[in-house]
Image: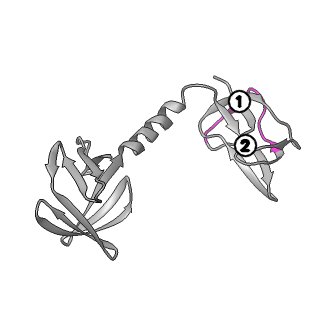
Amino acid sequence: MRYYVNLDPSSAAEPLLVDVTELPTGALEVSVGGRRVDVDVVAVGNALSVRVDGQMVDLTTEGAPPEVGAVASGHRSYVRVESERMRAAEAAKKSKGGSGDRVLKSPMPGRVVKVLVAVGDEVGAGQPLMVVEAMKMENELKAKAPAKIGEIHVAAGAAVEAGAKLITFAS
């Protein structure tokens, strides 16, 4: 798996490319910036004991990718670590907004309690659009981004399945 590691998350510097492959033996094959690095990792309680090119480092991490805090040899630093998968998912989210149908779908089966908008309304991000009741709980569905209501597919009182089209936004 390829990782993009920025040792100074506050800068716009190019990240280091770190490739990690787990071998069938359980050993790790690692290269940093195209240079092979001899690495061995052992979990010790909540910490990791890491050998990098013959040097031992006790490492404790905090947080979750992409923003990770690391304490190594008594020194704390913060790094940004993104896997190829994380980057691909983020790129897909960004490109998704401008293409294809823009549709609000029911996140769960239930009954439409209220429709709070009409065709032609301009809505802002976070604005409530509809209330759907599921398991005796009312769930307010909100706009994810500014948009114009193009078509409303259901009326108050309608039963809907998960994934049912509720509203189509105008292009």
Question: Residue at the spot x=36%, y=47% of the render?
Answer: 83
Task: Examine the rendered structure and indicate whether residue 49 appears above or below residue 104.
Answer: below
Q: Nearer the viewer, mark 2 or mark 1?
A: 2
Residue type (three-letter) at the residue carrying disc 2: Ser
Within the image, what quadrant is residue 64 found in?
bottom left
Q: Is residue 159 magenta?
A: no
Task: Examine the rendered structure and indicate whether residue 14 appears above or below residue 67.
Answer: above
Q: Position of residue 115 (x, y in %)?
A: 80, 40
Q: Position of residue 119 (x, y in %)?
A: 77, 28
Query: If the image is split into quadrants, where does the C terminus sit?
Result: top right
Specify whether 130 is left or right of 96: right
Q: What is the magenta range?
A: 114-125
Q: Which mark is residue 114?
A: none
Question: Residue at the spot x=37%, y=52% of the render?
Answer: 66
Q: Nearer the viewer, residue 129 or 50?
A: 50
Residue under numbered circle 2? 106
Specify whether 45 is left or right of 167: left
Q: Position of residue 26 (x, y in %)?
A: 29, 60
Instruction: Label the magenta part by its dominant secondary structure.
Output: loop
Residue under numbered circle 1? 168
Q: Nearer the viewer, residue 121 or 66?
A: 66
Within the image, what quadrant is residue 61 found in?
bottom left
**Can you name the residue that lies furthest to the front here?**
25
Residue type (three-letter) at the residue carrying disc 1: Thr
Task: Examine the rendered structure and indicate whether residue 158 appears above or below residue 70.
Answer: above
Around disc 2, counting alpha carbons within 10 Å, would you say few (fewer than 14), some (14 to 19), or many (20 or more)?
Answer: many
